[in-house]
Structures are given as C-alpha cells and as structure tokens.
Image (tube, grey):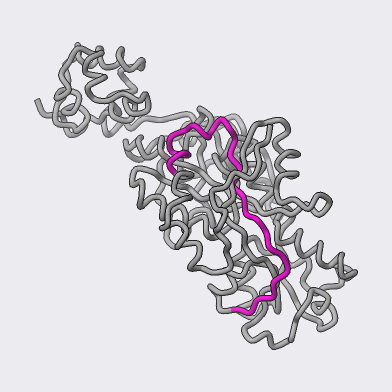
Amino acid sequence: MKQDSGLRNNLKSIRTRLGMSQQDLANIAGVTRQTISGVESGQYAPSVAITLRLAKALGCQVEELFWLEQDLPEIEAFLAKTVPAGQKVRVSLARIGGQWRAYPLMGKDAFRQDMIPADGEIVAVDGFPGISKLSNPKGEAISQVGTEKLQVRLLDDNMDILYNTVVIAGCAPVISLWARATERWHPQLRVQYNFANSMAALHSLCKGEVHIAGMHLYHPETGEHNIPFVRDVLAGKEAVLITLGVWEEGLLVQAGNPMGIKTVSDLLELGATIVNRELGAGSRMLLERKLQQEQVPSQEVKGFDQIVTSHQDVAFAVASGIADAGISTASVATAFGLGFIPLHQSRYDLVILNEHLEEAPVQQLLGTLGHRLVHSQLEVVGGYDTSKIGEVVATIN
C-alpha cells in the first residue's frame, strides 16, 4: 500500500540515531526488513498494529514517527542569541548536549555569500516568557526574546540533517574551507560556522551553544597559546585542544605600503589611521601587546576606537582606503591583494568538550583533519603552517 503523499515519517532518523540497522529494527518489531525499507522510503503505509510495534521497538511515541505534511512537527529549542519579539524569525538548528539550539538567521548571520536556508521558524506567542524591555538608539522601548526555551516549527521533515549538524564558533576564514571539504567527504554531515571572536567562541562553548570553539589567543605571562584562557573560562569542564594550524598575524597595509609602515610605532609616527577589532578578539590583543612593548600609547593611534568585527572587515577597510592599516592574517592580506607586515605566529586551536567527542558528527568532522583535501585547501590560501594539523596539544580536566 503506497503511503499517502501527505504523510511523513521520521523512522530512519530515529533508527540510525539508535545505531540500529533496518534488519535490527525488523527483528525487534516482528516485521520484514522490506517493510522497514518501504516505510522509510514512503512507499508503504503501515497498519496501526505495525505502527505501534515500531514505536515500541524504538522507545518513542507514534507522533514522533508519523505526521501529516501540513502539520510539520515543532520542537523545543534554546535560542543562541536574542531576537525581536513579535516578528517571524528564521533559524537553523543543531542538537548539542541533548538539547536543541536555535540560531537566528538575522542580519549578517543570515548570509555567507548567499542567503542561508532555514530549518525552522520561531512560533510567535504573545506574552511568551523571556521577553525583556530594551531601548533602541532613539530611546524607544523594544521587546526582545532572550535565550529562553521556545517552540520552533520545522520547515521540512528532514531530521537527519539536524541530527548530523556540527556547530563551530570561531573567526578563522579557513574554517569554512574545512567545513566544505568535510561535507564533500560526508554528504550527510552539515557544518554550521558561526562567526565569533576567540573569547566569544569559548564562552559559547561553555554555555552549550556550540560543539567546537576556535581560538587564537596568546598568553604573554606563560608564553602559551589558548590553554590558560580555556582553563579559566571552562572552569573545571573537561576538554581537548586540537590544532588547526599556525598562522601569520600582522599589519595589513595598502598595496605597495605607500606610507612605509614597518612597525606598530610607525602607526603613530607616520599619522596612520587604523581600524581595530572588538574586545575579546585575538587581533586586538596582539595590537595592544605590541603597542605596549614599543611604548606607544594606544589612544594616541588614530582609529584605535574605530571597531570592525571580522578579519574580512579589517581587510575591506584597508583595501577601500578607509584605513591605512589593521591587524589580521597573511592569508587575508593575500586574498585582498594587500601588503602584510608580520608580527606574530599564532596557533589556532579547536576546543572541544569531552562530552561532544564521542558524537558521530563531531568524530566525522575531526576525522577529516588528516585528509589531503583539507590540507590543500588551507595551504593554498597561504600564511598557514599545517604540519601539526589535527594534533592534540592539550587536555583540560
């Protein structure tokens, strides 16, 4: 009996999540493997008796297995960022630590090079708990939904992609190259890259909003990269640090370096205008450290308080003439055709909580760090040393 076109099922997603083959499920439910295959493909509508057997075998409710297309399921999720109340909000979804996380697709987060497809939409409920009153720049009161639990209406029934989503927060542009290369090896895997500076990414990991945090922070007192910051922020959580690569950080200057900038002290002496990064960014910490070493008062440097929020924004400001210089990486300088003055070699690490290490999607993603395809993608952009990629550099207890 062919399944009604309006009837959808989640049988395969639940079965594979439990590590069961079609034959395993067939044996437990007392049906044939062909029956399981037919139901999963939508070619067979099971009887009430078989439906009940399947639900019992999988330890779930019938409603979790079957629904009508016009009545797509809703799930409870926690917002990763605040959103305006009372308007439709598109979200992407991922499961982290046994909970669904909803990532609003708004503003810059809604785009990469093209618009990001949504997994669901927040169900608007008047008076929903978690509404807080804020003020906009004009002083007018606005409402926003905070990071509370809420209902998300799914836009399709492809639960497999949601369960196979790995979320990374970080600021390294090459993370997207790694993600796309990984998805070629594992077509069922989806990697969601949320832009965040190093400290913001680490705090997102601590709050359970991401599986992996990328960071490149140098601790001058110990001479270590990243480890002291992870110990401090994670506060007793167990984690590992895995190296993605070592990159060259320094000053981006206009092509040909027309001002003749050689050191950060030249920024003041030559009257150069810079753009800076926000608090918590490794690039800002590098600039502040170098200015201090050369005894240059940071507030006397033009543009020190002119903030942009990504490596690409720094490069765009310099390339467009808005600024004469800014801190970023050699690979970004190459991509924008800019001059580059090296200041520091920084190790970029991936921080993963131990509780996420055994999750199959995370293992698939990390397993590609040894693939030549990934290495070649990172090497071709320039400014990266990938000789120790995939190496565990620290365990945090």
Taking the view exactly as shown, the residue that stands out farthest to the front is 387
Residue at 81%, 82% (x, y): give it. 271
Magenta span includes 133:
no
Is there any visible trace of residue 148 in the rendered image? yes
| Residue sitting at x 68%, y 36% | 396
Task: Find residue 137 and report its horizontal and vertical position in percent.
Answer: 70, 56
Where does residue 232 sit, x and y in percent of width and height? Answer: 76, 39
Number of numbered discs visible in the structure rendering: 0
- Identify whether 261 is placed above or below 328: below
Residue 306 rendering spot, x and y as whole percentages:
74, 67
Magenta highlight range: 338-364
Query: Is 349 inside the magenta-drawn segment?
Result: yes
- Name the quadrant of the N terminus: top left
What residue is at 58 percent from the left and 68 percent from the top? 383
Task: Name the one closer to the observer, 220 or 187.
Answer: 220
Tell me if 237 is positioned left or right of 36 in this view: right
Q: Quadrant of residue 355?
A: top right
Image coords of residue 113 (percent x, y):
45, 63
| Left or right: 53 as drawn, with respect to 124 | left
Quadrant containing the C terminus is top right
Q: Taking 227 as reference, is 43 left or right?
A: left
Taking depth in this image into account, of 337 and 219 the one nearest to the observer is 219
Where 88 falls versus 308 (above or below)?
above
Closer-to-camera residue (378/71): 378
Look at the image and tell me whether residue 125 can be seen. no
Residue at the left extreme, as displayed: 1
Residue 367 versus residue 256 in the image, above or below: above
In the shown orientation, is residue 327 left or right of residue 390? Answer: right
